[in-house]
């Protein structure tokens, strides 16, 4: 990003960062000034990768530490149960 004050990405160092695939329609032009992507373009979708303390916690847009499909299914079941009790 052209900044000297925010450290480096190297083996053996902890890292907290996220990454986006900018080959999407909503990011057209973002490569012209990557530093301004958050302020001018914004990020309204899940990110592609997130690394916390050097560990990947989001990979290919999905959480790594939990089974998202099971959580979604359970949440949808709970919403259906709640809504069925309202009628």
Image: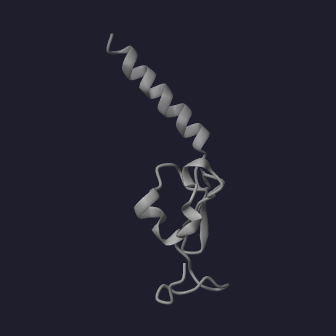
Instruction: Give the x, y percent position of residue 15.
Output: 56, 77
Q: Residue at x 61, y 52 (%)?
A: 61
Task: Spot the residue most to the top.
Answer: 87
Specify the quadrant that holds the N terminus: bottom right
Say which of 11 and 6 sits in front.
Answer: 6
Instruction: Give the x, y percent position of residue 2.
Output: 54, 83
Q: Is residue 50 visible?
A: no
Residue 11 shown left or right of residue 74 in the figure? right
Say which of 41 and 46 sits in front.
Answer: 41
Q: Residue at x 59, y 74 (%)?
A: 54
**Picture quadrant of residue 42:** bottom left
Q: Is residue 70 visible?
A: yes
Specify the quadrant that holds the C terminus: top left
Q: Residue at x 60, y 69 (%)?
A: 55
Seen in the picture, residue 79 relative to 85 is either above or below; the reply is below
Instruction: Give the x, y percent position of residue 69.
Output: 61, 39
Seen in the picture, residue 8 relative to 35 is either above or below; the reply is below
Residue 81 shown left or right of residue 56 in the figure? left
The color scheme shown is one colour
Seen in the picture, residue 74 relative to 66 is either above or below; the reply is above
């Amino acid at each position: 990003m052209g900044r000297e004050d925010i450290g480096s990405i190297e083996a053996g160092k902890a890292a907290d960062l996220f990454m986006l695939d900018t080959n999407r329609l909503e990011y057209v032009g973002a490569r012209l000034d990557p530093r301004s992507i958050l302020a001018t373009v914004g990020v309204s979708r899940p990110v592609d990768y997130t690394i916390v303390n050097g560990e990947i916690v989001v990979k290919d847009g999905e959480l790594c530490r939990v089974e998202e499909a099971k959580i979604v299914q359970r949440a949808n079941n709970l919403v259906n149960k709640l809504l069925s009790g309202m009628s």
